[in-house]
Amino acid sequence: MPVLRTSAIGRRAARAVGVALVAALGLALELAGPPATHANDAAEPDIKAAMVFNIARFTQWPAAALGPADQPFTLCVLGRDEVTVALQALEDKPLHGRPIRVTPLVREGAIGDCRMLFVSRSETFRLNQIVSLLATSNRPVLSIADIPGFALKSGMVNLVKVDEKMRFEINQKEVEARGLTMSARLLQLALIVRTRNE
Amino acid sequence: MMPRRPDTRAVRVAAVLIALAASLCAGGARAQADLADASLEDLMQMDVTSASRRTQALNDTAAAVHVITAEDIRRSGATRLAEVLAMAPGVEVARVSGGITQTQRSLMLRAAFTD
């Protein structure tokens, strides 16, 4: 310190070094942490919406089922809660070469336009009705719900929370019966509640 | 040189604040980053938070804290506990029944009652 006090230039230099150190510290704090680019916690609806997107990414539709490449990828939504609000953020994100269009399923007859259907927990009371509606679509619809027991009925995927982490159940039998193919990686991460042979 | 000192100090303080603010903002932006771009494995590793954006110990959750000091009580001239508690925001004290020998008081804390 006595050396730094000998001249105004020295003082200034010391301050500059101080500022640089603080800036470096700030940067270090920012860069520190896990190598993953995301924080290690998030709100439940946001994680669920992100999982819906990722599950669809690792699912393959028969080429004919997706229609021409200029058609959007329609994500139909039944019910309304924080998850369906979070799903709105997926609008226009590319999925299988098409922009996602998030739309509420207002008419039962429009199920044929859905490449994918998300069923909110708010629809628990009419689960059976929804499951039979899915069976009427002539094109494969990836069905994902946030309702306990969905994948044990004729639903395909159900989001579940286990020990404060999100998991997903897959009804492999239903997925394959409708002509969809899920990647080995997806199946490996899933809790398989029904195998293809069941 | 000497008259410039307050300036350089101000600049230094500003620089420190900007550096800290920048690092905080960057952290916030990262937390808000598009989760859909995270891998399924990463998503499945995340702790699920409820209403607030971050996991926190119950003790750290936001809570209204109001401290009534001995000096406050002395100045108020309160002689009953209910009168002291009424000094805190959100606490209402109401006289329920004026008995012959004593007055019953009802305490209300942000809509939660006592009999």
Image (spheres, coloured by chain):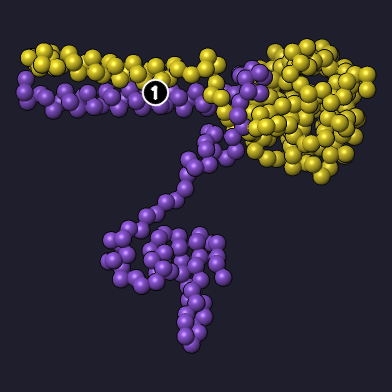
Chain colours: A yellow, B purple
Quarter of the view holding residue B45: top right
Front-lying residue, A17 or A104: A17
Residue at x 54% of width, y 34% of height: B55
Residue A153 horizontal/vertical position (percent) = 88, 32
Q: What chain does badge 1 belong to?
A: B
Quarter of the view holding residue A118: top right
Callout 1, which amino acid? Ser
Front-lying residue, A111 or A9: A9
Residue that numbered label 1 is attached to: B23
Q: How many marks?
A: 1
Quarter of the view holding residue B5: top left
Location of the N terminus of chain B (image quadrant)? top left
Q: For this view, does A18 lie left or right of residue B42?
A: left
Label 1 secondary element = helix
Residue B32 horizontal/vertical position (percent) = 52, 27
The residue carrying pointer 1 sits among few (fewer than 14), some (14 to 19) or many (20 or more) residues within 10 Å by Cα, namely many
Residue A25 horizontal/vertical position (percent) = 35, 18
Location of the C terminus of chain B (image quadrant)? bottom right
Residue at x 88% of width, y 18% of height: A176
